[in-house]
Image: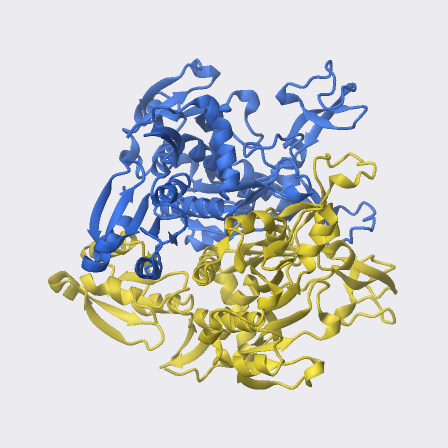
Chain colours: A yellow, B blue
Amino acid sequence: MTSAGNSKEVKKDEIAELARRRGFLWQAFEIYGGAAGFYDYGPLGARLKRRIEEEWRDFYTREGFYEIETTNIAPREIFESSGHLESFADQAVVCNHCKNFFRVAEGVKVSENCPECGGELEAAGEFNLMFQTRIGVPKGESDSGVKKSEGYLRPETAQGIFLNFQRLLRFNRDKLPFGIIQIGKAYRNEISPRKSLIRLREFTMAEAEVFVDPKEKNNHPRFEDVKDRMLRIVPGEDEGGEEEEESLEEAVRSGIIANEYLGYHIAKVDEFLERIGIPRAKVRFRQHLREEMAHYATDCWDAEFLSERYGWMEIVGVADRGDYDLSAHASFSNADMSVHTEPEKIIPHVIEPSYGIDRIIYALLESSFYEEQVGKEKRKVLRLKSEITPIKAAVFPLLNRDELKKKAREVFQKLRDASIFVEYDDSGSIGRRYRRQDEIGTPYCITIDYETLEDNTVTIRERDTMKQVRVPIAEVKDVLLKRE
Amino acid sequence: MTSAGNSKEVKKDEIAELARRRGFLWQAFEIYGGAAGFYDYGPLGARLKRRIEEEWRDFYTREGFYEIETTNIAPREIFESSGHLESFADQAVVCNHCKNFFRVAEGVKVSENCPECGGELEAAGEFNLMFQTRIGVPKGESDSGVKKSEGYLRPETAQGIFLNFQRLLRFNRDKLPFGIIQIGKAYRNEISPRKSLIRLREFTMAEAEVFVDPKEKNNHPRFEDVKDRMLRIVPGEDEGGEEEEESLEEAVRSGIIANEYLGYHIAKVDEFLERIGIPRAKVRFRQHLREEMAHYATDCWDAEFLSERYGWMEIVGVADRGDYDLSAHASFSNADMSVHTEPEKIIPHVIEPSYGIDRIIYALLESSFYEEQVGKEKRKVLRLKSEITPIKAAVFPLLNRDELKKKAREVFQKLRDASIFVEYDDSGSIGRRYRRQDEIGTPYCITIDYETLEDNTVTIRERDTMKQVRVPIAEVKDVLLKRE
């Protein structure tokens, strides 16, 4: 196996082209000219996404966390309390000619000309990133300023968990700590997103909210299990800001990572990213600078992926939200968010690993794509881990003959009946069929030939090594399901 | 097993109370007083929902359909073309005093007084049911009537599939028929929903769009497999409107159901509802009257569930959308939505089974809830099918002793490691622990006692019969996973 012949220059566009052509990712509303910040997942992309989400759910379920599902729309009060209405905003400029808005953080300044039409740019102040709508008021009607009809699309899934805190505490029999997860859509009315998966207006988050007694933050019951994990970290300015590699235990004991709970969840994020196949050499944890910290966070670390296209980019955030959210909702709603722990009442703190699923998919596609020379041909291959590939295996008749096709259909059906997601393909040469599967990451190709009709064996060809082994049909399932 | 002692009067409130108390369903934003039409799924509800969705995905994947995932927000043009901006509306009245809107279809008329404040009701015309927002325009800013910034939350998932039709056709190698599925949120800005799962402003749909050559609508390749299925049907006015029971084949051959494709998918809906445990005696298929048909449908049948609380209610719709959507998008966007089939170009027709997941969950909770007398105690039990219960089994130590708890923990962990979702519980009497599991539908309780320590056997107690069997630990997994 070799990754020689892999050129970074070519790669960028190859991935986008492959993702579009093979049904991973499509610009949404393309027949109407598209809209920046919106993508659809095609058949293979949706399967890849689903399998990553299932791995994630499984990973945090094994931590003992329960999943809930809360609404995408919420009334104004929620985001008044959470601080998003006031603080969830980017600085913007607006063109006085074409009226387009631009994001100051992306380098467009008042002193420059409009990148769209050359017009004059004026300061436009803060641009709140939430999508607004109205609940129960017809679209044509004025709501006469009645605040209660205002609704917003959630900018994170977390608030739905905080709002249900009392019920969740009761579900957990009034004991701390406990963790709750949610996977779902979130929405940010970005000012001028480029057309890519990196800055979407609608995206999928997978978030865990871990509620812990603040006195216990340095006492995670399973810290031992992860303490020796080596992490590549970039501490914030107070710690010098220099990238270093050290064990989780060293980072927590020296105070670079503030407490065991935060540290434990940073290690878990690192473990999950490795599990789904993000190369460890391309992941680091960077502490937020004070000025980039979200309004709710007392500390925050980003898991960053080193993209060949975009440089270091955030794919997961791990925040210590302190008691910010529960206290804010307690104060605005008058609900009691406290927990009785001997000898006092406390407001729990929240540790939050927050995954951007779309960016993780981008990172997986980019880092698993290889183009290599095989004999006289170029081979494109997605080296995705077998646990997350859209298709588990493809079944081929070697030749386009009825007796082989019939047998291949039987093998296909047998595997489908065992809930293994396989595809059947009998069109084109066998080499062409291998290439088609390589470029969508299918780890195994099963070929039915005349020997199969005699002794019920098939060849299984492995994607990365391209090696073939001959296996009895009865053993195919085990080969396909072995965990790498 | 008996369902005696089950009183309909008590039942209604018992279900709502149980759903809230045990973490199935919670009124959203409750600490802020709630908002009509919005519900959250708690830990058990979210697991139940997930398992129903998985069964559904599995069911249609076995039909050969692929899933995609498209955006919740879409620009105005999409719904101009689809007809939703013009036609997706309810007639409303408005109170001239409190300014509340009411839905005429629910019986509130202009000649009456406001049900909220007694004020005078005035006709308010059509109330469009889509949630409107603005894309890329800050919430404070006027968009000066620029139409292109308007966006809407999708009222159905289907449009996202139609918009990608060309790419999906290509994915299917330019051949008809093929089916595409999507599970996701949809939104309807209902005028005055009551607080229940039945009329939500945000809800989950599971939709399949089947694209077929119109000439082939009476030639479904697997019609034979389902033709003998007996259906309870209520034809529309043209057919007399009388409820009858007949086989699918009779209904199609006599013209009551318009074609084989529509008939096949009606039968599949019936099969799926049975598979997840909706009692067949409580399901019928009713053809829409002309005046209730959606603007896009040429024919539509509802699968209705007979609710003790709400009477017959729609839980699935099966529509023949003809070429309405593809033709509309072709005409508005100038995209070519035709398919070349010998000897001509055609616009495919669409058959659409569209499931309301939240209503199905309500139907399952209502129809599986039983209250029965066991000795001197009342037992509440959810007789959900084992394939969809939130918890597969609970593991108990018989007594609160360390050696039993240790062994029970081992059994618990062994099952979790085998990816079986089990709970551990050692609090309260064994009888109380059984009752706790009964009322959330857990099909099996596994008890570890002193005999277990001697011979590695446990008792498995079955939810519905309350019978116990003694089984070696090594065989527990097989008992739990057998399909009913």
Residue B194 at x, y = what percent? 61, 30
Q: Above or below — where is A89 with respect to A257?
A: above
Question: Residue B176 is drawn in which quadrant?
Answer: top left
Q: Above or below — where is B401 with respect to B153?
A: below
Direction front: furthest residue: A343
Q: Above or below — where is B384 with respect to B295?
A: below
Q: Is residue A238 left or right of residue B262?
A: right
Residue at position x 48%, y 31% from top? B14
Instruction: Please name whichever residue, A437 or B287, is drawn nearer the observer in this view of the structure.
Output: B287
Instruction: Please name whichever residue, B461 or B101, is drawn nearer the observer in this view of the structure.
Output: B461
Residue at position x 87%, y 59% from top? A96
Instruction: Please name whichever residue, B395 or B61, is drawn nearer the observer in this view of the structure.
Output: B395
- Quadrant (top left/top right/bottom left/bottom right) for the N terminus of chain A: bottom left
Residue B330 at x, y = what percent? 58, 43
Q: Is residue B402 left or right of residue A150?
A: left
- Quadrant (top left/top right/bottom left/bottom right) for the C terminus of chain A: bottom left
Q: Is residue B277 left or right of residue B361?
A: left
Instruction: Please name whichever residue, B389 or A370, is drawn nearer the observer in this view of the structure.
Output: B389
Whether residue B37 can be seen here: yes
Question: Residue B477 is drawn in which quadrant?
Answer: bottom left
Whether residue A369 can be seen here: no
Residue B306 at x, y = what percent? 44, 24
